Amino acid sequence: MRQAPLNYLVTVVLGCLLWVGTALFAGQQIGDAVVLQAMTTTQFVQTYEGVLAGAAVLGVLGCVAWYVYGSREAAAGRLADARRTWTLLLTAEVVVAAVALLVLVFSFRAESLTAANFAEMLVLLLLQTALLFWGCSLAFSPRAVEYIPWGRR
């Protein structure tokens, strides 16, 4: 499963499955649970799903960038650089989740959402970005860099 294109395909499938869970199912539950004042439930869910779709694409692209980087011959000879690159990509995924949350906060500023609602959204965004990146890099990293992700040593 560490060979291209299988790792790429599995990552895309996992990203899509996560999006279905975090955007479609959880989005509908959140939309039904909150009291909306300025938007309809449909508008709320569509905005939420759109932001999570963007985060999902960036989560998968982070994994693809890691696979491409790890496939290069130079990565095997420079494991300290590979470790920094992996950490940078993981940090970028966390930043993507935070920015996506800010977009949601700004989009729903007229609504009466609680901090718990936004905390739930942040957890779902982190699942879609950082946790997807960590899990896929843990399971599907190319052989040269397979021991770089945290928890693999």
Image (spheres, rainbow, N blue to C red):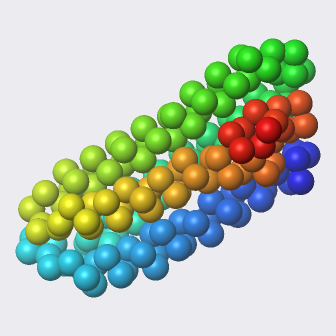
The residue at 64%/22% (across/down) is 84
Residue closest to the eye, 63 or 144? 144
Using the image, determine if residue 18 lies above or below residue 51.
Answer: below
The residue at 51%/34% (across/down) is 91
Using the image, determine if residue 111 lies above or below residue 83.
Answer: below
- Give the x, y percent position of residue 106: 19, 51
- Relative placement, left or right, of 57 versus 54 is right
- Relative placement, left or right, of 49 versus 81 is left
- Give the x, y percent position of residue 8: 77, 50
The residue at 63%/47% (across/down) is 133
Residue closest to the eye, 50 or 97? 97
Instruction: Give residue 87's quadrant in the image.
Output: top right
Q: Quadrant of the N terminus?
A: bottom right
Using the image, determine if residue 57 lies above or below residue 40.
Answer: above
Q: Quadrant of the C terminus?
A: top right
Residue closest to the eye, 84 or 46? 84
Whether residue 8 appears in this view of the structure is no
- Give the x, y percent position of residue 68: 77, 33
- Relative placement, left or right, of 80 versus 22 is right
